[in-house]
């Protein structure tokens, strides 16, 4: 396991392409200037030791030096000690709707991106709770098992899109069924499932499944993402709207937030429905709900000690700088024998 302490220094890597561009401009200018002064044959006689290869080699070494020094500033750390830590929290599983209707832009930037924002902000406000993520459309897919690794959860969350599941629909019942397998302790009473959806469920099984989940101690909270007025589903290419989804009659499909379905599911599992329009209100509501729940103690392994590794990259950076300083641009005997780029011609 590793950590990057000062990621902002990665911007310093932009110096490398800048150096490369400057080198290219300088070489073109030098070539034009020399061309006006004399022919290549005469230049080779006047300056037999000049070497294009050495110039390129110095550029590569200088770029390596900057790369190593940048990584040294970032200060990567490697975990050296793994400890088992005991903490108390709630097991929270997020089920995110990735059906095509979630592309509707009746809530900015669209329903799916809004769902991701909501989950991210909820995670940011968690303390020692464990989390899991499920993606679902017509079928449900396990995206991340129960974990305390919030960084990984956010990474998996951002990778979710409407193309990850080929079958379409909004089978919330499938998501609830899959979530029931996430909790490893049957006696737990702090099992939470948070469903984010526009509520366009095409079957009536979800409420029955929610009630069955409630009997296992799972509380389901639903977050409605979208607007009751609805909106069309854009078909895009390279972020440009080409058309809107049509039905079998050629009419533009208007998808609407179905709060009634989401309310029934939440009520059936001793939960609550929350409108997802305002992120702050949603986060505060979930935070209050979780704070009132009983916490269960669980063990989690994590790295407790990290050692700095910047000194290695600092050393390599200085080493490459010294090579660059002492490496001359003129040809040496071994380089003449290699005759790279046919420079002896």
Image: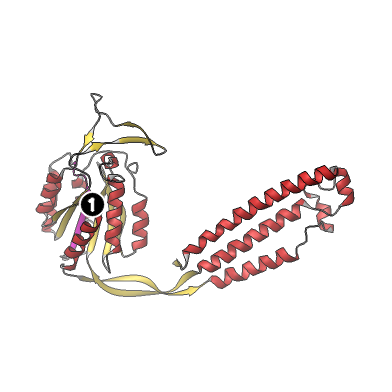
Whole-percent x and y of residue 238?
Answer: 42, 38
Q: Quadrant of the C terminus?
A: top right
Q: Residues within 10 Å of mark 1 (few under 14, many from 20)?
A: some
156 on left or right of 291: right
Q: Quadrant of the N terminus?
A: bottom left
Decide if residue 255 is in sight here.
yes
Question: Residue sitting at 39 percent across and 39 percent down?
Answer: 239
4 on left or right of 131: right
The type of colouring in the image is secondary structure
Residue 335: quadrant of the picture: bottom right
Local SS, label 1: helix
Residue 312 on the magenta span: no
Q: Nearer the viewer, residue 239 or 302?
A: 239
Whole-percent x and y of residue 287?
Answer: 21, 64
Q: What segment carries the magenta color?
A: 190-200
Residue 195 on the magenta span: yes
Question: Residue sitting at 66 percent across and 68 percent down?
Answer: 319
Q: Which residue is mark 1?
A: 178
Residue 118: quadrant of the picture: bottom left
338 on left or right of 143: right
Magenta: main secondary structure equals strand
Whole-percent x and y of residue 180?
Answer: 20, 55
Question: Residue sitting at 25 percent across and 29 percent down?
Answer: 252
Question: Residue sitting at 27 percent across and 40 percent down?
Answer: 104
Decide if residue 141 is in sight here.
no
Whole-percent x and y of residue 236?
Answer: 37, 36
């Amino acid at each position: 396991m590793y950590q990057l302490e000062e990621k902002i220094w990665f911007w310093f890597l932009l110096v490398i392409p800048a150096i490369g561009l400057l080198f290219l401009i300088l070489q073109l200018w030098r070539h034009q200037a020399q061309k006006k002064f004399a022919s290549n044959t005469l230049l080779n006689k006047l300056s037999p030791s000049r070497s294009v290869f050495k110039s390129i080699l110095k550029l590569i070494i200088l770029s390596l030096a900057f790369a190593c020094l940048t990584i040294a500033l970032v200060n990567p750390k490697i975990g050296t000690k793994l400890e088992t830590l005991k903490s108390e929290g709630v097991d929270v599983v997020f089920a995110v709707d990735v059906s095509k209707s979630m592309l509707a832009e009746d809530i900015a930037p669209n329903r799916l991106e809004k769902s991701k924002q909501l989950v991210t902000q909820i995670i940011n406000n968690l303390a020692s709770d464990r989390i899991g993520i499920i993606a679902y459309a017509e079928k449900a897919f396990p995206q991340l098992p129960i974990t305390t690794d919030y960084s990984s959860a956010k990474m998996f969350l951002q990778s979710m899109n409407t193309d990850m599941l080929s079958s379409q629909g909004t089978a919330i019942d499938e998501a609830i069924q899959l979530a029931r397998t996430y909790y490893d302790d049957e006696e737990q009473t702090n099992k939470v499932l948070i469903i984010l959806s526009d509520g366009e469920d095409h079957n009536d099984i979800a409420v029955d499944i929610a009630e069955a989940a409630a009997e296992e101690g799972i509380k389901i909270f639903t977050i409605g993402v979208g607007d009751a007025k609805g909106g069309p589903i854009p078909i895009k290419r390279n972020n440009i709207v080409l058309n809107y989804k049509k039905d079998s009659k050629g009419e533009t499909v208007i998808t609407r937030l179905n709060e009634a379905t989401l309310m029934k599911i939440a009520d059936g599992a001793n939960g609550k429905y929350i409108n997802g329009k305002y992120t702050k209100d949603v986060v505060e509501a979930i935070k209050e709900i979780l704070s009132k729940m009983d916490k269960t103690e669980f063990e989690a392994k994590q790295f407790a000690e990290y050692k700095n590794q910047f000194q290695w990259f600092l050393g390599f950076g200085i080493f490459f700088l010294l090579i660059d300083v002492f490496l001359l641009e003129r040809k040496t005997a071994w380089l003449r024998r290699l005759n790279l780029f046919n420079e002896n011609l």
